[in-house]
């Protein structure tokens, strides 16, 4: 029995060390240095090389190292019997709450404009938007969206949210499924925290931007593929949107030649809104690993029909 840590881009050594700190008897391999393919029964994947999993005949569970699972859903080498899970970690959620609060305040208080002004030694106060007059609308009220909504409420914002099924969150006005237009009509700051699925790919398009309340802002912290990039540029040029903050992109790292780089009304961060902590995630992964071995119900499983 062994755990495989597999990623093309992430240094998995801290995660192996954290697992071994918890249980020194574990057998943990880091791709591509696998001792025995037959021994691998649990894998932890992040941005993994595609079509590798059929090499592990005894693989039973794959855990995403983060909250998103879209990187696993299109891998045809994952057998139908393999259960997919994800890491849902309090520290990851807390970081997302911090990031959303920080970036929304930065957008409505013009932080980026002041950064440019400072470079030119320019003293020019700009009227800012007050949070009492803006409504934040969160698309996706799952593990992250719900917590972000509650944090923003605690910070004095008015918050609404949209999800597939009906939700009840204190002080948050909730909308479901077919009520998207009503949700947008009351939203100034649109925050995308949806999973990437066949229903949500390309959801952040011109139609959505046109239907937002004015002034309008966008924060995409979910996946780059949610956004129709040329529609964002058009919406900014047409003043349908005041500012956008993006943490995720269709192609990461964002290419040097990408038009987003040169825009003063787009704030870019390199997919850092919330990062998986090795020690915290190791505890959650080990818990599910032990559950698998003892035949107990796994935590945070992915519903393949829903794609999240
Ligand atoms: N930038 C970063 O650093 C970073 C870090 C972590 C995660 N993320 C992204 O954040 C995403 C959300 O994570 P999470 O843990 O909060 O996901 P989650 O717990 O699975 O929640 C997903 C939410 O989206 C709603 N939803 C899904 N499909 C929908 C649709 N077609 N229409 C309306 N609502 C829909 C769900 O509705 P129901 O509740 O009704 O099912 C649920 O409320 C991840 O998938 C990942 O892409 C980004």
Image (cartoon, rainbow, N blue to C red):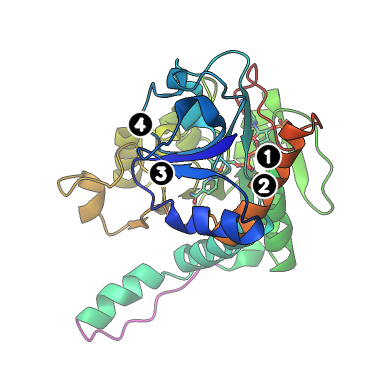
Q: Is label 1's Cβ within 8 Å of ligand 1?
A: no
Q: Is label 4's Cβ within 8 Å of ligand 1?
A: no
Spot occupied by residue 277 in the image (x, y as percentages of width and height): 55, 59
- Quadrant for ligand 1? top right
Q: Earlier in the sequence, mark 1 or mark 4?
A: 4
Spot occupied by residue 103 in the image (x, y as percentages of width and height): 49, 63
Secondary structure state at the residue bearing disc 3: loop
Secondary structure state at the residue bearing disc 4: loop
Vertical order, 200 against 290 (above or below):
above
In this rendering, does residue 96 appear at all? no
Using a 10 Å C-alpha cutoff, classify the residue at mark 1 as few (fewer than 14 neighbours), some (14 to 19) or many (20 or more): many
Residue 289, labelled with which disc?
1
The residue lying at 40 percent from left, 41 percent from top is 7
The residue lying at 72 percent from left, 48 percent from top is 146
For disc 3, the marked residue is 240
241 relative to 230 in the view: left or right:
right
Q: Earlier in the sequence, mark 3 or mark 1?
A: 3
Q: CA distance from mark 1 to mark 4?
A: 22 Å
For disc 4, the marked residue is 49
Q: Are marks 2 and 1 in contact (CB under 8 Å)?
A: yes
Query: Which quarter of the rendered picture does the C terminus lie within?
Result: top right
Using a 10 Å C-alpha cutoff, classify the residue at mark 4 as few (fewer than 14 neighbours), some (14 to 19) or many (20 or more): some
Spot occupied by residue 250 in the image (x, y as percentages of width and height): 34, 36
Q: Which residues are magenta?
A: 120-129
Q: Are marks 3 and 1 in contact (CB under 8 Å)?
A: no
161 relative to 36 in the view: left or right:
right
Q: CA distance from mark 3 to mark 1?
A: 48 Å
224 relative to 148 in the view: left or right:
left
For disc 2, the marked residue is 286
């Amino acid at each position: 029995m062994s755990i495989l840590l597999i990623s093309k881009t992430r240094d998995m050594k801290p995660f192996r060390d954290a697992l071994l700190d918890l249980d020194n008897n574990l057998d943990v391999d880091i791709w591509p240095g696998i001792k025995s393919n037959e021994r691998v029964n649990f894998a932890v994947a992040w941005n993994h090389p595609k079509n590798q999993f059929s090499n592990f005949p005894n693989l039973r569970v794959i855990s995403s190292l983060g909250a998103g699972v879209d990187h696993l859903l299109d891998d045809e080498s994952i057998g139908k019997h393999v259960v997919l899970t994800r890491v849902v970690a309090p520290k990851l959620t807390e970081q997302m709450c911090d990031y959303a609060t920080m970036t929304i305040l930065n957008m409505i208080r013009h932080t980026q404009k002041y950064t440019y002004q400072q470079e030119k030694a320019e003293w020019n106060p700009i009227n800012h938007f007050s949070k009492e007059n803006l409504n934040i609308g969160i698309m996706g009220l799952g593990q992250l969206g719900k917590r972000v909504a509650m944090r923003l409420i605690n910070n004095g914002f008015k918050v609404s949210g949209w999800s597939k099924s009906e939700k009840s969150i204190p002080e948050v006005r909730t909308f479901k499924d077919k009520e998207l237009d009503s949700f947008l009509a009351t939203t100034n700051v649109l925050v995308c925290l949806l999973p990437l699925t066949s229903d949500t790919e390309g959801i952040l398009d011109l139609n959505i931007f046109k239907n937002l309340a004015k002034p309008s802002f966008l924060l995409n912290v979910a996946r780059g593929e949610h956004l129709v990039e040329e529609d964002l540029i058009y919406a900014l040029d047409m003043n349908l949107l005041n500012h956008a903050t993006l943490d995720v992109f269709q192609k990461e790292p964002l290419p040097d030649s990408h038009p987003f780089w040169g825009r003063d009304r787009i704030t870019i961060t390199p997919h850092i809104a919330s990062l998986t902590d090795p020690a915290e995630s190791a505890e959650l992964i080990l818990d599910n690993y032990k559950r698998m071995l003892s035949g107990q119900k796994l935590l945070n499983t992915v519903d393949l029909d829903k794609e999240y």
